[in-house]
Amino acid sequence: MIGRFIRGILVSVVVLLPVAVLGITLWLRTEVINLEYELAQYQQMKENLLDEQRRLLTEKEESGSVWNLERYAKERLGLDSLNRTRVFYVRIQPGPKPYITGYREQQ
């Protein structure tokens, strides 16, 4: 009786153990494939973000260039290039002195 019980357990272990190992192996392989797919998606997203960053940096550098600023001033603000005949130099003069009241002479 006990021999049959032990034999039944051994047979079930011998049969179920390879099935369990095969099932776990297949599950792990499926998980690895899913993780590889997800990693590929994140790498593609990273490449897209790096491309957008390069594009934005280039756009930023171009928008601040002297040529673009001059073009913006001419087209949008209606400004024109300067020539030397239209430049006026302003001399700074001292302002008026404060008014002093009293009997003493003003200096």
Image: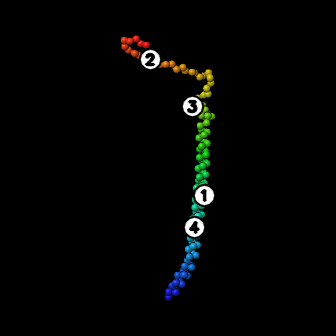
The nearer-to-camera label among 3 and 4 is 4
Contact between marks 1 and 4 (CB within 8 A): the answer is no
User: What is the x, y in percent for residue 70?
Assistant: 61, 32
Query: Horizontal placement of 2 versus 66: left or right?
Result: left
The nearer-to-camera label among 2 and 4 is 2
Closer to the N terminus: mark 3 or mark 1? 1
Q: From the viewer's perspective, is residue 23 above or below residue 96?
A: below
Q: From the viewer's perspective, is residue 55 above or below residue 11?
A: above
Q: Which residue is mark 4?
A: 28
Q: Please state which amino acid type lies under the numbered disc 2.
A: Lys
- Which residue sits at x=58%, y=75%? 18
The nearer-to-camera label among 3 and 1 is 1
Q: Which residue is mark 2?
A: 97
Q: Please state which amino acid type lies under the numbered disc 3.
A: Leu
Distance from label 2 to label 4 (Cα)? 92 Å
Q: Which residue is mark 1?
A: 40
- Which residue sits at x=40%, y=15%? 100
User: What is the x, y in percent for residue 38?
Assistant: 58, 59
Contact between marks 3 and 4 (CB within 8 A): the answer is no
Q: Which residue is mark 3?
A: 77
Q: Please state which amino acid type lies under the numbered disc 1.
A: Ala
Closer to the N terminus: mark 3 or mark 4? 4
Frontmost residue, 50 versus 86 = 50
Q: Quadrant of residue 99?
A: top left
Contact between marks 2 and 3 (CB within 8 A): the answer is no
- Which residue sits at x=62%, y=24%? 83
State the SS at label 4: helix
Distance from label 3 to label 4 (Cα)? 66 Å
Distance from label 2 to label 1 (Cα)? 78 Å
